[in-house]
Amino acid sequence: MSSRGPAAARRSAPFFHGPAQGASDRATPIQRPEDHPKLPWRPEINGGAAAQRLTKLLLNVTIERSVGPVLVVMSPENTVADLVRTAVETYAKQGRRPLLSHADPKSFDLHYSQYSLESLNPEEKLISLGSRSFFLFSKPKMVVG
């Protein structure tokens, strides 16, 4: 073993200093992805049609007082009301705790987060929301009196 340490040996390696003296000066041309024949053709790279439309969205809906989110896969053309209905049905079907006091989707409001005071419009399309994570609150009960 030499008196030089492993760091000195690494610094003197050919990859550190470049090719050894007398090596060929011809460099292998780097193939760009557009030039490589085995790569699949992507229209957005080659100036063709735009990227494909989304067909499904994976959404996280955390229900008030629950431990984790309910994962829901839906079409981007569905509405907020459809998401609320599906999330409540999925939560009840999975037998999650705590049990919901009522399973009527109309008794819930969907919010962007647990800190958001404004509920989302039930008629709004999912694709226009700009988020994939939501929070579901029970609507406050109206006391007449």
Image (cartoon, rainbow, N blue to C red):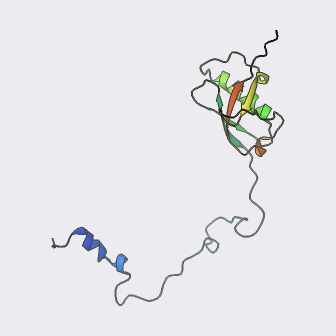
Residue sitting nearer the eye, 61 or 32: 61
Q: Which quadrant of the view contains residue 102?
A: top right
Q: Position of residue 68 (x, y in %)?
A: 58, 30
Horizontal and vertical percent for residue 26? Answer: 47, 88
Question: Left or right: where does residue 8 sit relative to residue 17?
Answer: left
Nearest the eye: 142 or 99: 142
Q: Residue at x 74, y 49 (%)?
A: 54
Query: Is 7 placed above or below 141 here?
Result: below
Q: Residue shown at 63%/72% (left/top)?
A: 37
Give the left or right position of residue 54, taking residue 63 as reference. right
| Residue name at image x 80 percent, y 36 percent | 79
In the picture, the quarter occupied by the C terminus is: top right
Residue 83 sits in quarter = top right
The N terminus sits in image quarter: bottom left
Q: Residue furthest right?
A: 123
Which residue lies most toward the top here? 145
**Does 12 appear above or below 135?**
below
Q: Quadrant of residue 120?
A: top right
Q: Is residue 17 left or right of residue 43?
A: left
Work out which residue is located at the far front of the displayed protein and give it: 145
Residue closest to the eye, 30 or 121: 121
- Total number of numbered labels? 0
Task: Give percent across and percent down for residue 88.
Answer: 71, 25
Q: Position of residue 46 (x, y in %)?
A: 72, 70
The answer to whether 17 is drawn above or below residue 83 in the figure is below
